[in-house]
Image (spheres, rainbow, N blue to C red):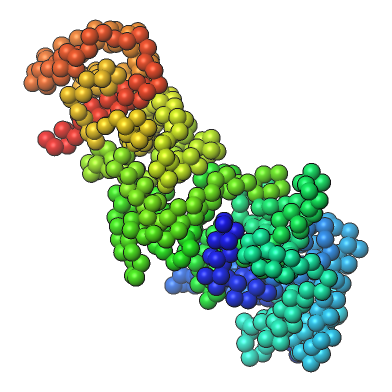
């Protein structure tokens, strides 16, 4: 079902309109004359780079994407050339990357194989002037001459190691200097026929489409872009049958997972489209992004079986739940609002490891269910927010940052982001690791600092998720803001610590280390060992307030008595969930102080 829906995506978006060609960024264009003489070399990224009013370069230079002959699945050691568009080691027989030296004999073999493939096409198209010009150029130019030409005509914006992977294409059309040789309709037809030649290929029934007597592929889809990039740079397959231990029941690499060449191409193209940002559509315009990086080694891709508004899903990462809530209820053109849309919805969470892709999770549901689950999470995560903001929630990028040591999201466990997305989009209970991570982060870094000031926003983000955890996992109603009538001991203890801290700051002013900085961890886990001492010390601070600010002193003393009035004893220890309620009480009481101050 997953493969079938990926194939449907590629067909619906027109990515298989001409399966013989694929979109790739071409870095250099070699312009040739009528006799194959070299005219000049154009660096495409420099030509396409945006410039300001004074003509100065602006932004990062990137080569434009062009449709080029579909590339093979060669490895670094293969001597198989690509047709008309390839790297310098094949086109010129040179190695542009510094420090990487291949034997001149191997480079010459690759250069010759590139020219031989063009000469094969020239046998069938003897009158094609473009092929004649390219063949003449390759026959006359030597690697030494080409190296001098490259140095003398272009100053590359590419890094030296990137230049090794740069693609070169040829231009021979005096009337259109942007039209490449491989764009010639005659050449396209020849190359298409070469790929479609089924002589000697095995045929059978396709596992994906169910079609009979179709050509089966030997190597399955190897999409690029699955993290981590250091492991999957050349692409990794979703399925492989390349070991004897995999070949049970006498099935070989084809029989183990029989997939037709067309279906395999559609699956690979769809995954490449989902994994890439700004993937070009049939008209060259970029398609909307459909991926969300979750960690250094995992990524989530998502799609639907027809064109449906899915922007709300990606907005979970960067927008607060209120903004996402408006998106799930907005109608886009002829499409219903996502919260009412029954369209099938799919999502994959992928990682790369040990030469193959790992499907960590497959989501099969509907747009409507995802939107309603997000709405549910929006209500559960709604909390009073700092800095005068309206009550609401936080985007997932901020929440992950708030849960990570020193705000570095990459230091979270790899599976954490995956489980968080699955819980929100599928309406599942949150994993116990969510509560444990929140409590641990509060105890070690309750208030992270930015520019010397406490960043209360990260504490608020953790508390927002904590509130959602209690409501979803325990069915416990948790208020948006302070609820003075709440009688749980742990909630009241959190309020008590926030109150003692406030009394100290109002009596003594700014301090290098407050009560919260010193005692939050021990107060939330072993209250009996900490609170009697803190209450005794607070009498001195209250005395200072009564002397300097009599009215405020009375208000704070009454609040202290109100909180302590419902506490019959101080527990020796608090369990994990009680420590979570302690954090909620602390945040609610602390934010209530600042809310009142802003109101006054």
Q: Give residue 71's quadrant in the image.
A: bottom right
Residue at horizontal 27 percent and vertical 25 percent from the top: 585
Q: Does residue 62 show up?
A: no
Q: Residue furthest right?
A: 105
Q: Position of residue 316 (x, y in %)?
A: 39, 49
Residue at horizontal 35 percent and vertical 18 percent from the top: 524
Q: Give residue 256's quadrant in the image.
A: bottom right
Q: Position of residue 21 (x, y in %)?
A: 66, 74
Q: Give residue 526's quadrant in the image.
A: top left
Q: Nearer the viewer, residue 193 or 165?
A: 193
Q: Position of residue 69 (x, y in %)?
A: 69, 74
- 520, above or below 97, in the image: above
Q: On the rendered image, what quadrant is the C terminus found in?
A: top left
Q: Position of residue 247 (x, y in %)?
A: 78, 48
Residue at horizontal 34 percent and vertical 43 percent from the top: 377
Q: Is residue 152 left or right of residue 430?
A: right
- 118, above or below 206, in the image: below
Q: Nearer the viewer, residue 343 or 331?
A: 343
Q: On the rendered image, what quadrant is the N terminus found in?
A: bottom right
Residue at horizontal 59 percent and vertical 76 percent from the top: 17
Q: Is residue 32 left or right of residue 298?
A: right
- 581, above or below 198, in the image: above
Q: Does residue 131 show up?
A: yes
Q: Is residue 189 left or right of residue 587?
A: right
Q: Count the marks: how many? A: 0
């Amino acid at each position: 079902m997953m493969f079938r829906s990926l194939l449907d995506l590629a067909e619906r978006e027109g990515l298989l309109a001409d399966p013989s060609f694929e979109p790739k960024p071409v870095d250099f264009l070699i312009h040739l004359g009528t006799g194959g003489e070299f005219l000049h070399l154009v660096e495409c990224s420099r030509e396409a780079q945006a410039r300001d009013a004074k003509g100065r370069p602006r932004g990062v230079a990137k080569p434009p994407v062009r449709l080029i002959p579909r590339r093979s699945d060669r490895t670094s050691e293969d001597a198989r050339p690509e047709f008309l568009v390839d790297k310098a080691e094949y086109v010129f027989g040179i190695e542009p990357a510094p420090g990487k030296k291949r034997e001149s004999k191997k480079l010459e073999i690759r250069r010759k194989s590139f020219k031989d493939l063009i000469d094969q096409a020239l046998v069938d198209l003897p009158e094609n002037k473009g092929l004649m010009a390219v063949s003449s150029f390759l026959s006359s130019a030597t690697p030494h001459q080409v190296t001098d030409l490259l140095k003398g005509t272009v100053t590359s914006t590419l890094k030296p190691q990137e230049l090794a992977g740069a693609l070169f294409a040829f231009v021979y059309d005096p009337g259109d200097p942007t039209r490449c040789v491989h764009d010639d309709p005659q050449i396209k037809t020849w190359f298409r026929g070469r790929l479609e030649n089924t002589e000697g290929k095995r045929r059978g029934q396709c596992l994906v489409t169910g079609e009979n007597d179709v050509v089966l592929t030997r190597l399955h889809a190897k999409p690029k872009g699955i993290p981590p990039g250091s492991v999957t740079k050349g692409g990794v397959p979703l399925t492989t049958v390349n070991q004897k231990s995999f070949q049970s029941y006498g099935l070989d690499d084809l029989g183990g997972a029989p997939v037709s060449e067309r279906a395999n191409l559609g699956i690979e193209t769809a995954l490449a489209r989902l994994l890439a940002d700004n993937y070009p559509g049939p008209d060259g315009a970029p398609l909307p992004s459909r991926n969300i990086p979750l960690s250094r080694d995992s990524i989530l891709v998502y799609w639907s079986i027809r064109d449906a508004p899915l922007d709300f899903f990606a907005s979970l990462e960067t927008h607060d739940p209120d903004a996402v809530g408006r998106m799930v209820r907005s109608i886009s053109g002829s499409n219903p609002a996502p919260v009412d849309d029954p369209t099938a919805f799919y999502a994959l969470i992928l990682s790369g490891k040990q030469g193959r892709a790992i499907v960590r999770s497959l989501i099969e549901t509907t747009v409507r269910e995802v939107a309603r689950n997000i709405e549910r999470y929006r209500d559960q995560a709604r909390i009073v927010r700092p800095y005068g903001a309206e009550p609401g929630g936080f985007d997932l990028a901020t929440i992950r940052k708030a849960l990570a040591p020193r705000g570095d999201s990459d230091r979270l466990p790899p599976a954490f982001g995956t489980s968080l997305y699955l819980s929100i989009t599928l309406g599942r209970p949150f994993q116990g690791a969510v509560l444990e991570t929140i409590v641990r982060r509060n105890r070690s870094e309750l208030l992270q600092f930015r520019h010397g000031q406490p960043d209360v926003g990260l504490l608020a983000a953790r508390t927002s998720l904590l509130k959602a955890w209690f409501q979803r996992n325990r069915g416990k109603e948790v208020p948006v803001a302070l609820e003075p009538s709440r009688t749980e001991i742990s909630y009241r203890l959190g309020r008590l610590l926030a109150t003692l801290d406030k009394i100290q700051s109002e009596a003594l002013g700014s301090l290098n280390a407050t009560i919260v900085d010193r005692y939050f961890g021990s107060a939330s886990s072993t209250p009996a060992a900490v609170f009697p001492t803190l209450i005794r010390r607070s009498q001195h601070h209250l005395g200072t307030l009564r002397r300097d600010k009599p009215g405020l002193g009375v208000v704070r003393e009454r609040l202290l008595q109100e909180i302590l009035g419902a506490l019959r004893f101080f527990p020796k220890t608090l369990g994990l969930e009680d420590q979570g309620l302690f954090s909620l009480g602390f945040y609610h009481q602390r934010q209530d102080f600042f809310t009142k101050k802003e109101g006054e």
